[in-house]
């Protein structure tokens, strides 16, 4: 079991659900970004997903895309992102890091070189949201050689036979996209979300975390009744747009969501 999977399983074993917050690296600038990520760890994140700034992000809505553009405008680079993550993970108590990164960046860097850089920076897993499962073979090999997990996405529209293919070689946890479309906060959860997550949990021993659209402590508690973990992104990213005390505002929201995921008891049996 990898460090990332162990962190999620351990959260569930103590009756909680894994809290996996997302932020864009370098947004709104590298100094604030690093402080914000440290604050997420302080608020009890079980793992942290860090988005690698990219100008043409396909899976993200306007909030995350805007954060990427601001990070790039502020001078964020591959080297500065990796260096920042390395500073964070020097603290062995820092939560496992999942790097969400467009495959274009990985490919242009070179698969083995990118994985080597990631492992050296203390990254635990890589999530390329735009890579079709049929094209994962070469990346899987590089991740295996580097000892990193490859996180796979499952969508509401994914047919059963394709889910089986996605599960082959998946590591860390399964990321279930709660709704069709791009990332972004939503006021309501899909009616069939629980049933969909239960079906997925029955197909694999890996934990299942839900993301895309969950933004409030109340929604977090609802999803925690049937999922092993929760990914929250856009709602947290937006707090860093505040004119005053953005990191404190981030900490308040993150702490409230973390609290909503505590003491929920065991998840349903597979």
Image (cartoon, rainbow, N blue to C red):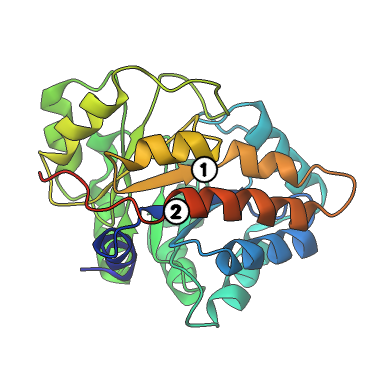
Which quadrant holds the N terminus? bottom left
- Nearer to the camera, 79 or 124: 124
**Residue 157 coordinates in the image, percent (x, y):** 28, 18
Looking at the image, residue 124 lies above or below residue 245: below
Looking at the image, residue 228 lies above or below residue 247: above
Element assignment for label 2: strand
Tag 2 residue: 19
Q: Residues within 10 Å of mark 1 (few under 14, many from 20)?
A: many
User: In the rendering, which numbered label is found on residue 232?
Assistant: 1
**Residue 133 coordinates in the image, percent (x, y):** 26, 36
**Residue 156 coordinates in the image, percent (x, y):** 30, 22
**Residue 114 coordinates in the image, percent (x, y):** 46, 61
Q: Which residue sits at x=38%, y=59%?
A: 125
Q: Residues within 10 Å of mark 2 (few under 14, many from 20)?
A: many
Q: Is residue 51 visible?
A: no
User: In the rendering, which numbered label is found on residue 26?
Assistant: none
- Nearer to the camera, 176 or 129: 176
Q: Which residue sits at x=47%, y=32%?
A: 212
* Pointer 2 with pointer 1, Cβ within 8 A: yes
Q: Which residue sits at x=11%, y=46%?
A: 269
Q: Which residue sits at x=67%, y=43%?
A: 237
Q: CA distance from mark 2 to mark 1?
A: 8 Å
Mark count: 2
Q: Is residue 126 left or right of residue 27?
A: left
Give the quarter of the image for residue 177.
Answer: top left
First in sequence, mark 2 or 1: give its number: 2
Give the quarter of the image for residue 268.
Answer: top left
Q: Is residue 78 left or right of residue 246?
A: left
């Amino acid at each position: 079991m990898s460090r990332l999977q162990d962190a999620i399983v351990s959260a569930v074993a103590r009756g909680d659900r894994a809290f996996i917050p997302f932020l864009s690296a370098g947004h709104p600038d590298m100094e604030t970004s690093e402080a914000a990520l440290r604050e997420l760890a302080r608020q009890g994140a079980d793992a942290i997903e860090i988005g690698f700034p990219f100008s043409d992000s396909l899976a993200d809505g306007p909030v995350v895309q805007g954060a990427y553009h601001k990070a790039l405008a502020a001078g964020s680079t591959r080297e500065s992102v990796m260096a920042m993550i390395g500073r964070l993970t020097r603290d062995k108590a820092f939560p496992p890091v999942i790097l969400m990164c467009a495959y274009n960046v990985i490919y242009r860097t070179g698969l083995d070189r990118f994985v080597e850089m990631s492992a050296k920076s203390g990254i635990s897993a890589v999530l390329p949201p735009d890579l079709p499962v049929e094209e994962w073979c070469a990346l899987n090999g590089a991740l295996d050689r580097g000892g990193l997990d490859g996180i796979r996405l499952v969508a509401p529209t994914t047919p059963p036979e394709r889910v089986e293919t996605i599960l082959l070689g998946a590591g860390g946890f399964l990321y279930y996209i709660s709704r069709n479309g791009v990332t972004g906060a939503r006021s309501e959860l899909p009616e069939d979300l629980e049933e969909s997550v239960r079906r997925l949990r029955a197909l694999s021993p890996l934990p299942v975390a839900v993301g895309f659209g969950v933004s409030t402590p109340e929604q977090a508690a609802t999803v925690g009744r049937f999922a092993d973990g929760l990914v929250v992104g856009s709602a947290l990213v937006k707090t860093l747009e505040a004119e005053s005390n953005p990191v404190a505002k981030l900490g308040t929201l993150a702490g409230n969501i973390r609290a909503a995921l505590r003491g929920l008891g065991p998840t349903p049996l597979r």
